[in-house]
Amino acid sequence: MRSSLTRTLSGAVVAAAAVLTLAGTANAAPTHAPAPRVHTTLSIVESRLRIKAGQRDVIAGRLASRGIGLGKHVVFLDRWTGKRFVPIRAEITGPKGGVAFSVWPRVTARYELVYRGNAVFAPTHSGVVTVKVIH
């Protein structure tokens, strides 16, 4: 009697586990990989190679994808702090992807432009420019 009861209980447990496994799989939402984002590029240029302390320099760039400028996207100006780049300002790109930032560094400073991307366009960053300050 005991062995038949044990077999019945074991069979019921196995059957319940199988039903729960199938139910869990059937109710699981399908997962889809996100669509790949479109590659972007971000150029950077400084207007002057050297400035005196406190003078103005302009850091400019152009955000593009497949050679076409991307307007109305946020680009950040990052400055090197000694350990890492830190965002100091943000601007929206113009109709052809152009963006420009005025800076007045008192000491030599390194800058880069950063685009953080969105659902369609991939993030990117420019190279680094150094604004050399002479005293």
Image (tube, rainbow, N blue to C red):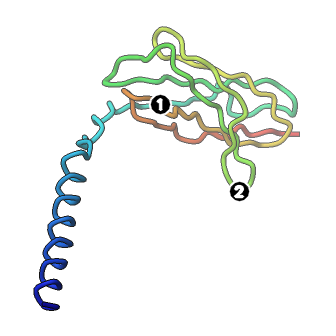
Question: What residue appears at the point 23 percent right and 59 percent down from the top-left corner?
Answer: 20
Question: What residue appears at the point 47 percent right and 24 percent down from the top-left corner?
Answer: 63
7 on left or right of 131: left
User: Which residue is at the front of the view, 103 or 2?
Assistant: 2
Which amino acid, mark 2?
Answer: Lys
Residue 130 horizontal/vertical position (percent)? 67, 41
Residue lying at the far bottom of the rendered structure:
2
Question: What residue appears at the point 12 percent right and 83 percent down from the top-left corner?
Answer: 7
Q: Earlier in the sequence, mark 2 or mark 1?
A: 1
**Which of the image's four quarters has the C terminus?**
top right
Looking at the rendered structure, the secondary structure element under dot 2 is: loop
Question: What residue appears at the point 73 percent right and 25 percent down from the top-left corner?
Answer: 57
Residue 22 horizontal/vertical position (percent)? 17, 56
Vertical relation: 41 (above or below) 92:
below
Looking at the rendered structure, the secondary structure element under dot 1 is: strand
Q: Residues within 10 Å of mark 2 (few under 14, many from 20)?
A: few
Vertical relation: 65 (above or below) 126:
above
Residue 84 horizontal/vertical position (percent)? 67, 52
C-alpha distance separating marks 2 and 1: 23 Å
* Disc 2 and disc 1 in contact, CB within 8 angstroms: no
What residue is shown with label 2? 83
User: Which residue is at the front of the view, 121 or 24?
Assistant: 24
What residue is shown with label 1? 42
